Amino acid sequence: MITVQNTINASIDKVWNLWTLPEHIQNWNYAFDDWHTDYAENDLQVNGKFKYEMAAKDKSAGFDFEGEYTRVEKYQLIEYRLFDNRAGSIYFENLGNKVKLTEVFEPAKNDSESMQKEWCQNVINNFKKYVENF
């Protein structure tokens, strides 16, 4: 399992909404400045589907990150299963005027774990910047 986390200086409702609403996901869901999320859909409920189309801005590479939610506890926990059957969890720990966000997920077999951890940590870092400057 890979774990990434960060502490965001914002209220739990702000963190939750900016994490889950597609119009916001498109603004922070990238690992490097030359990538972006072209499209995002998110049906945040058990058995609801999500799909993020992620691509290099120069269109040299891209992939869809998609799956289905298996558990949703508002302001606390989101669990999902990707379409390749890997599972993940996102924990939201309300610390008053801050939220500790932790994502734990099964790594893909075809990419190095260190690369996957770096990618996801960068995404979480971008999320923190986005929320704190929103």
Image (cartoon, rainbow, N blue to C red):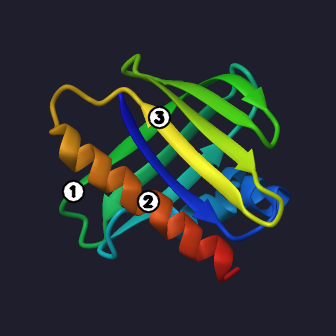
Give the residue pinned by disc 3.
Answer: 104
At label 3, which amino acid type do we have?
A: Val
Which residue appears at 66% of the width and 71% of the height?
A: 131
Q: Where is residue 62 in the image (x, y as percent from the top left)?
A: 28, 52
Look at the numbered disc 1 and give the secondary structure of its residue.
loop
Using a 10 Å C-alpha cutoff, classify the residue at mark 1 as few (fewer than 14 neighbours), some (14 to 19) or many (20 or more). Answer: few
Q: Where is residue 80 in the image (x, y as percent from the top left)?
A: 57, 26
Instruction: Report which quarter residue 13 is drawn in.
Output: bottom right
Quadrant that contains the C terminus: bottom right
Which residue appears at 59% of the width and 74% of the height?
A: 130
Work out whether residue 57 or residue 46 is closer to the camera in this orientation and state it.
46
Q: Distance between the residues labelled 3 and 1?
A: 25 Å
Mark 2 or 1: the one toward you: 2
Horizontally, residue 79 falls left or right of residue 95, namely left
At label 2, which amino acid type do we have?
A: Val
Quadrant that contains the N terminus: top left
Work out whether residue 23 or residue 131 is closer to the camera in this orientation and state it.
131
Instruction: Verify CB contact (< 8 Å) between mark 2 and mark 1.
Output: no
Mark 3 or 1: the one toward you: 3
N-terminal-most mark, 3 or 2? 3
Using a 10 Å C-alpha cutoff, classify the residue at mark 2 as few (fewer than 14 neighbours), some (14 to 19) or many (20 or more). Answer: some
Give the residue pinned by disc 1.
Answer: 61
Which residue appears at 34% of the width and 76% of the height?
A: 33
Instruction: Verify CB contact (< 8 Å) between mark 3 and mark 1.
Output: no
N-terminal-most mark, 2 or 1? 1
Q: Residue furthest bottom?
A: 133
Give the residue pinned by disc 2.
Answer: 123
Instruction: Verify CB contact (< 8 Å) between mark 3 and mark 2.
Output: no
Q: Where is residue 76 in the image (x, y as percent from the top left)?
A: 76, 38
Q: In this view, does 132 lie above or below 96?
A: below
Q: Where is residue 48 in the image (x, y as percent from the top left)?
A: 69, 27
At label 1, which amino acid type do we have?
A: Ala
